[in-house]
Amino acid sequence: MVLYWFEFSNTPFSFSSFWDVLKSQFLESFTFDMRGMSVSLIILGIFLGVVSGLFFITLRRKNKLIGTQQQLLLRDLEELIEAGENERVEFKSSIRYDYFRKTTNRELELVIAKTISGFMNAKGGKLIIGVDDDGSVLGLEKDFKTLKHKNRDGYEREVYRIISTQLGHEACFSNHTSFYGLNEKEVCVIDIEPSKKPIYVNDTGATTFYVRTGNATYPLTVKEAVDYLEARKL
């Protein structure tokens, strides 16, 4: 308001005159004639203060709730790993890095696709990557080094590329990735929903039907797949 006063008046600007005008405008706001505007500004200030306070309180509570939920999820994950592999849980050391050959092995991507399809053709489940068969947490560091984008985003894109290439684009919508820190190492968890339609793995032009049974994934012949799908409808 003070700046507008200088702009539309013929008074030359100076710091002393600026403070004089500012002081006079401030005092004028408390006069009888300006009481309406003053009250309005006070009410507006109180309202904005209350809204801001409530916003930050809500945000703080939300962050605290998210932190608590993450701790619970992490505890659940630790319990899953401790319980070992079963009909709904599978461990994989990596998606590309071969710990036996000590180098990148793209054939491991097909193994990941087979496991995911097996879960989708059964009851769904969790694929935990970065964990050895015996439950030892290996982390994703070596896998990260095989990627162009060596971070979680790059890893997630690679997971969905494998799913899309081997199982089809539609299968991506039934898989959800998340990352957790365990023993100062990162692991990736893929939550896999069961599919209403049969999911086939595209392996060098041939399509194969896999299903999760117990703690392993098995390929079925055409007849076995037909019988299995018919039985699942019942």
Image (spheres, helix red, strand yellow):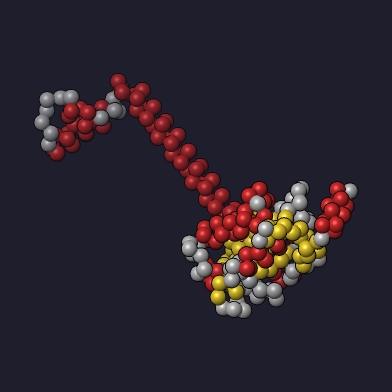
At x 68% / y 61%, what residue is drawn? 203
Relative depth, front residue between 84 and 35? 84
At x 52% / y 68%, what residue is drawn? 146
Relative depth, front residue between 230 and 133? 230
At x 61% / y 59%, what residue is drawn? 162
In which quadrant will I find the N terminus? Answer: top left
Is residue 52 left or right of 210 when viewed as pictured? left
At x 45% / y 34%, what residue is drawn? 47
Residue 124 sits above or below residue 136 on the image: above
Give the mark count: 0
Is residue 68 left or right of 60 when viewed as pictured? right
Q: Which residue is situated farthest in the top direction here? A: 33
Could you tell me residue 91's position as x and y percent? 68, 68
Within the image, what quadrant is residue 39 found in?
A: top left
Could you tell me residue 66's position as x and y percent? 58, 54
Could you tell me residue 164's position as x and y percent? 62, 53
Residue 44 sits above or below residue 53 on the image: above
Could you tell me residue 224's position as x and y percent? 85, 58
Residue 218 sits above or below residue 62 on the image: below
Q: Report whether residue 119 is seen.
A: no
Q: Report whether residue 230 is seen.
A: yes
Within the image, what quadrant is residue 28 found in?
A: top left
Within the image, what quadrant is residue 74 found in?
A: bottom right
